[in-house]
Image: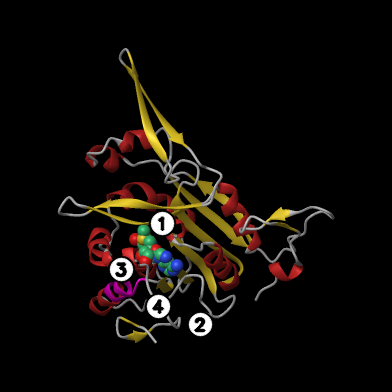
Amino acid sequence: MLTCGGAPARVEGAVGVPEWEALAEFYDEKQGDTGDLWHRALIDPVLFACIGTLPAGTRVLDLGCGNGYIARRLSRAGARVVGVDSGQRIIGLARARESVDPLGIDYQCSDAGQLGFLRTASFDLVVSNMALMDMADAAAPLGEAGRLLKSGGRLVASICHPCFDTGFCAWSLERIERRSTVYRKVTGYRALAATTGPWVLPDGSEARTPYYHRPLSWYARALSDSGLLIRRLEEPAPLPELLSKNHSPQGEWINEVPLHLVIEAVRADLPLTVPAGATMRSPDGHRRRPSASSLRRR
Ligand SMILES: C[S@@+](CC[C@H](N)C(=O)[O-])C[C@H]1O[C@@H](n2cnc3c(N)ncnc32)[C@H](O)[C@@H]1O
């Protein structure tokens, strides 16, 4: 049995993604208690607008919680929060923050797709902030979100935009006379693909973490297969803080083409029936008719 910050890990043999393990201290410092500039002035305002005001005692699960800054913000707003991340070191750092400032958050070290230790239909809200595209298997965590949400409960997840931040894309700037136009070039959109994304460390060196591109339709199918109906899609635009403080010109460019997507989906107990003879494509790409059992609570 592996241990995670001193407590037994929930998944036998579970180990965090090595690249994330190596960056745990950097990432904890970077996100702190408020999130970094890109989170504060771009992603989080939209994430929290989708979450809305939560009644006191709302049961929340934060999937891929990292150092737990979103979990803490929700807890301070009155929610009862469980945070899950596969990173042993980052969960240790989240727990260290909990011991300094106890909020009652239960941090668990586990793969987000293997949450058998959590009770079916026991959460009102599952949040996942910028984590699903970092997971090698995102279908299992979405399946767990569907299982763990009460009927009418919601998933609110932010991800790198599956259309415009694919890992196989680039900005292109065209200057004609005195007018500049920015374009986003995307290739290889349809293929499920693994690549890496860069982080600039405080000493100026670069580290990379795994990144998994999945087309937008993949997410829609995986959500539907998990009993989650998309209610809202938002594409965060930068707040003035990002435009004024960011030395990268990307703030202006993101005003043209979004790099992030926030999804709100509702756990439905509707029979997700399809017309006789119709087929749908499952997350693994195979065509099949949905079975009643695939929509039933496990
Ligand atoms: C970009 S960080 C986001 C962390 C946090 N949500 C935030 O907004 O700061 C992605 C996180 O996903 C976690 N992760 C990657 N694969 C995972 C998996 N299969 N199960 C649980 N967590 C995973 C990593 O350890 C990392 O902490």
Task: Check disc 4 and report its element: helix, strand or loop.
Answer: strand
Precedes in sequence: disc 2 or disc 1 = 2
Between the residue at mark 2 and the residue at mark 4, the CA separation in whole angstroms equals 10 Å
Q: Are marks 2 and 1 in contact (CB under 8 Å)?
A: no
Precedes in sequence: disc 4 or disc 1 = 4
Answer above or below: position of 5 versus 224.
below
Query: In the displayed image of the protein, which residue is found farthest to the top?
Result: 177
Q: Which amino acid is tagged 4?
A: Gln
Specify few, some or many for label 1: CA neighbours under 10 Å numbering under 14, 14-19, or 20 or more: many
The residue to which callout 4 is attached is 108
Q: Which tag is nearer the camera, tag 4 or tag 3?
A: 3
Between the residue at mark 4 and the residue at mark 1, the CA separation in whole angstroms equals 18 Å
The answer to whether the residue bearing label 3 lies less than 8 angstroms from the nearest atom of ligand 1 is: yes
The front one of 245 and 283 is 283
Precedes in sequence: disc 1 or disc 3 = 3
Task: Check disc 1 and report its element: helix, strand or loop.
Answer: loop
Instruction: Name the quadrant containing residue 3.
Output: bottom left
Ligand 1 quadrant assignment: bottom left
The residue to which callout 2 is attached is 117
Specify few, some or many for label 3: CA neighbours under 10 Å numbering under 14, 14-19, or 20 or more: some
Which quadrant: the N terminus? bottom left
Q: Which tag is nearer the camera, tag 1 or tag 3?
A: 3
Magenta residues span 87-93
Precedes in sequence: disc 2 or disc 4 = 4
The residue to which callout 3 is attached is 21
Q: Which amino acid is tagged 1?
A: Met
